[in-house]
Every structure is written in structure tokens, then in C-alpha cells.
Amino acid sequence: MPRVLVIEDDSLICEMVADCFRSELGAEVVCALTGPDGARLIMGYEFNLAVIDAVLPDVSGFALAQLAANENLPVLMTSGHPLLSDQLVRFNFPHLRKPFDLNALIEEARTIISGTRQNIRRVQHSAATMRAHLKALEIALKEAHRLMAESKTFVELDALVGNRNSGLPFEGDPLGPAHGIGSLHKRIPTCPALSADAPRWPAR
């Protein structure tokens, strides 16, 4: 008799799936309505299959799938969220898109249970690929933020230098707009030209 763990926060869906497994596979089924309960069951009991909803309110279904695979428990994921369903396809997780046909559910379950090792390797590879992708994305975002910060600094410095060269006031100029650094030459006194009758120092 196969033992199946269903991790699904919708109690109606959970019971519907459990009834299907009981009637079609003669399986013993345990339902978990929260991620933490699912994690405890994965680590504390032996099952032949875990059916895991990708969208849970407290724990990522992807994290639970990876935990299950690491515990040598094969996984079938489900999701009705379009974006997450696309991610399941992109990273090659074994899954069914909600709403799914119960016959398809039983067929997938039988295939996975009969090919446990292949399923576990597939889930582990999918999870590792997803982690690498997310890490690369995180690094790229950090680099983009760094470049944006540097670009902003260069623009501010360029504006500051331009204002100084033009004599325009700039933020922090202690002399104010009428006495900008660029107008420093206007504040240097000039010597009047000496006329012919101006007093002169005697030559040595």
C-alpha cells in the first residue's frame, strides 16, 4: 500500500486529492495544510510520494520539494498560478497545472512511484538550476544598483565642476551666489597704471 503526503493549504482540494488516491491506488494518505506541518511530516515519516502545492502562505513549495528530494521522497508539484506554473515548466519540475484531471493525477503518481530515483534526481537538478538562476539574478541586480549609484555620483560631480568653471553658484559654496569660485577673478584688485606725474620711488 503506497503512502502519499499531500501538502495543500486548500482543505477541499486536499481532501479531494486524498480521496482520489485512496479509491484509485488504495493509498494511505496524510494531508498537511501548512508548510511547517508538511516539512515535519517529510522529515519524520516515510512516504512513497509527496504532492506539493507550489503556492503556500508560509513556506515555499519549491523549498519543500527540495527538502523532500533530499529526504529521498519523490515529488509531484501543483500550481494554478500562471507565473509559477511557467517556472515549473522552465526548470523542469514534475508538476500538474491546476485545475488538473484526476485521471492525470493518478497516472502521474503511478509513473513517479515506479521511477522514484529518476524523479528524485530530476527534482534535485531542477532545484539546483533554479537556485543558480536566482543567485545570478541577485548578483546582476546588485551590480546594476552599484553602477546606477556610481553613475549618479559622476553626474553630480560633473554638475559641480561645471558650475565652478562657469562662475555659477553651487551647493555648499560658502561665498554664496554673488561670490562663486568662478567669479574669483572679479574680486582680485587691479593696480592702476602709473601716470607720468605720479610719485615714484627713487631708483637705486
Image (cartoon, rainbow, N blue to C red):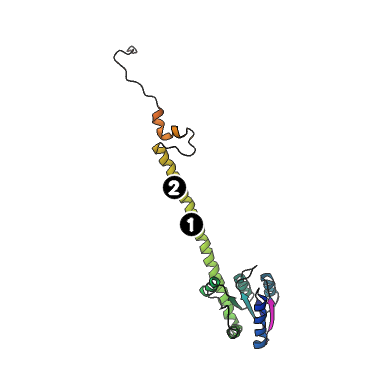
Q: Is residue 191 above or below residue 153?
A: above
Q: Amino acid at mark 1?
A: Ala
Q: Main secondary structure of the magenta part?
A: strand
Question: Badge 1 is on which residue?
Answer: 144
In the figure, is residue 42 to the left or right of 130? right
Give the mark nearest the N terminus, 2 or 1.
1
The one of 37 and 73 positioned closer to us in this rendering: 37
Tell me which corner region of the image, top left, top right, bottom left or bottom right, holds residue 183. top left
Q: Residue furthest left?
A: 196
> Where is mark 2, residue-wise?
155
| Residue 47 seen in render | no
Q: Mark 2 or 1, which is nearer the eye?
A: 2
State yes or no: residue 30 in magenta.
yes
Helix, strand or loop at label 2? It is helix
Q: Residues within 10 Å of mark 1 (few under 14, many from 20)?
A: few
Compared to 166, does 54 lie above or below? below
Query: Which one is in front, 180 or 27?
Result: 180
Of the residues shown, which amino acid type is indicated by label 2?
Answer: Val
Instruction: Give, as a single range, the part of the protein colored magenta.
Output: 26-31
x%, y% of residue 13? 64, 78
**Please, is residue 137 above or below residue 73 in the view?**
above
